[in-house]
Image (spheres, grey):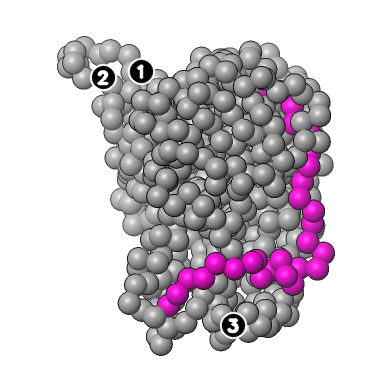
Amino acid sequence: MYQSFEVTARPEQGPARLADLRAEMARIGVDGFLIPRADAHQGEYVAPRDERLSWLTGFTGSAGFCVALEKVAGVFIDGRYRTQVKQQVADDFTPVPWPEVSLTDWLKEQLPHGGIVAYDPWLHAAGQIKQAEAALKGSGITLRRSDNLVDQIWGDQPDAPKAPVIEHPMEFAGESAQDKAARLAKGLRDAGQSATVLTLPDSIMWLLNIRGSDVAHNPVALGFAILHEDAQIDLFMHAEKLSNIDLPDFVRLQDESAFIPHVTQLKGAVLVDMATVPQIVADELGDQMVAGNDPCALPKARKNAAEIAGSQAAHIRDGAAVVETLAWLDAQAPGTVSEIDVVKHLESSRRNDPTLREISFDTISGTGPNGAIIHYRVSEESNATLEDGHLLVLDSGGQYLDGTTDITRTLAIGTPGQDERSAYTRVLQGMIAVSQLRWPMGLAGRDIEAFGRAPLWQAGQDFNHGLGHGVGAYLSVHEGPQRLSRLSDVALEVGMILSNEPGYYREGAFGIRIENLIVVEAAPSTAGADPERDMLSWKTLTYAPLEPKLIDVALLSPNERNWINSYHSEVRQILSPRLSSSAKNWLDRITQPL
């Protein structure tokens, strides 16, 4: 199995570890220590060695941080994890709603007379520290760089990963690494910059057309890179990772220990992304540093024709695997199947595809109250049976050589209640509204994400996560800078792949989420349109049926009903040739017109 069902952190382990951390704080004479869920590369996902937040607190979410002070330890979590954190941390830790409560406001409340809060400069982005120091000015609270105090007390901390790197072939990449480097280097020269420092793993993988497996479910290798204005690249990575490939001549392999010495030797203006460059790099660059965006981010987000074609092909194969599992599940009697059974069957279905390399994240298989935990991870201890009247939130994806998938379907076990049907239908209406949307070029995710929430708003409901995230091309399933979020000001452009995933969660009862991946394309012209106004629209990449038992047809408009029927017709046409006879018969039945 790509997925483990072991319990990786327990609340009862936290208090003793927190006490040890406080002893280290006292030893070096500080009043607090910051523990982010981050590594030196500032990506969203981290290797086991860098799971410091989880190891200390028990909280296993993919975002958040802890601030340990002498008398209180706050665990800062966003809306996705408000339910989960209650189950995972001991009473010694205090959940803090973030970003509603900022780090600096909380520190000023907890340390009214000032104090020293230490942090590891490798694990915090320069922009975060700059913003925090400005907000703390005059408070008497000082942020101090230090060695990592968690590492000092983590006796069995795993070693750094050294998984082998593979080449990502041109048929899937669509552009050579040399052409990418030349294109970005020209941008540096045009801006009067001599180099840029890259730390994000997926940026480096995209630039060099390589992939790795240092981080679970993400085809990335951990390292650093410096792209120079002459298109030469210094790559800082353990040599043994690259023993099976030949790097091109314009890439100079260096040991990771040489990264900071090379940074200190850079001349001229150096471009850094303040949101991802570690503070230690900013310290070394000083006045040479020019703040800007990671130059790989937008080119990586704008998928080329080969990447889009690969993603479309991967989604078709992935859709067939999902349907095989949905057909199997529908044939099981309520009370006979568990959450883990569903995860295992789905992974087995995906493994029939020889191009599968990994799942793209731990499959979320949550029934009943577990479905209301937005990023629920089933374990041997939490594993629940699918009972009559329950819903099952099944959120999963695969990492294929030609693309990354991410799909969520909410399923009815037995006979669902009317509350569940009404909420599901409103979620579906939001997903349809976004899928059908046309919008003027230049708008960002914040300008259009409300379309996916409006049907829920009409009923006084909402959900505490973004409407959609960017997705890579055989890369990270969460990819920036594009998002469907009220916080995103990045303009949507042709070729960007995003998720469309409204939801609804009733704590202690049930959860609902429906997710398709969609790609931005130029909208076809329509009669009466302004000829000077360029419009964009979506093409749906995901193929899998919706749950008819949960659709309240009386709530749908004719347009919404037609969209569902058209989508289901396309799902049948595209997937049927790839299905077993039993799954095909099930799909034919489940996708009959409403």
Region of the chain picked out in magenta, as a range? 141-168
- Residue at the image position 55 percent from the left and 67 percent from the top: 145
**Badge number at residue 522:** 1
| Mark 1–mark 3 distance (CA, rounded to whole Å) | 59 Å
Question: Which of disc 3 and disc 1 is earlier in sequence?
Answer: 3
**Badge number at residue 534:** 2
Q: Secondary structure at mark 1?
A: strand
Q: Tell me whether circle 2 and circle 1 mark residues in contact (CB < 8 Å).
A: yes
Q: Position of residue 209 (x, y in %)?
A: 63, 24
Q: Is residue 145 magenta?
A: yes
Q: Which residue is mark 3?
A: 29
In the image, what residue type sits under mark 1?
Answer: Ala
Q: Nearer the viewer, residue 261 or 312?
A: 261
Q: Secondary structure at mark 3?
A: loop
Q: Nearer the viewer, residue 261 or 250?
A: 261
Q: Is residue 86 shown above or below 42?
A: below
Q: Nearer the viewer, residue 33 or 547?
A: 33
Question: Which of disc 1 and disc 2 is earlier in sequence?
Answer: 1
In the image, what residue type sits under mark 2?
Answer: Asp
Q: Position of residue 260 (x, y in %)?
A: 60, 48
- Residue at the image position 64 percent from the left and 34 percent from the top: 235
Q: Is residue 396 magenta?
A: no
Q: Position of residue 375 (x, y in %)?
A: 59, 53
Q: Position of residue 98 (x, y in %)?
A: 45, 64
In the image, what residue type sits under mark 3?
Answer: Gly
- Residue at the image position 34 percent from the left and 33 percent from the top: 491
Q: Tell me whether circle 2 and circle 3 mark residues in contact (CB < 8 Å).
A: no
Q: Quadrant of residue 224?
A: top right
Q: Is residue 143 shown above or below 328?
A: below
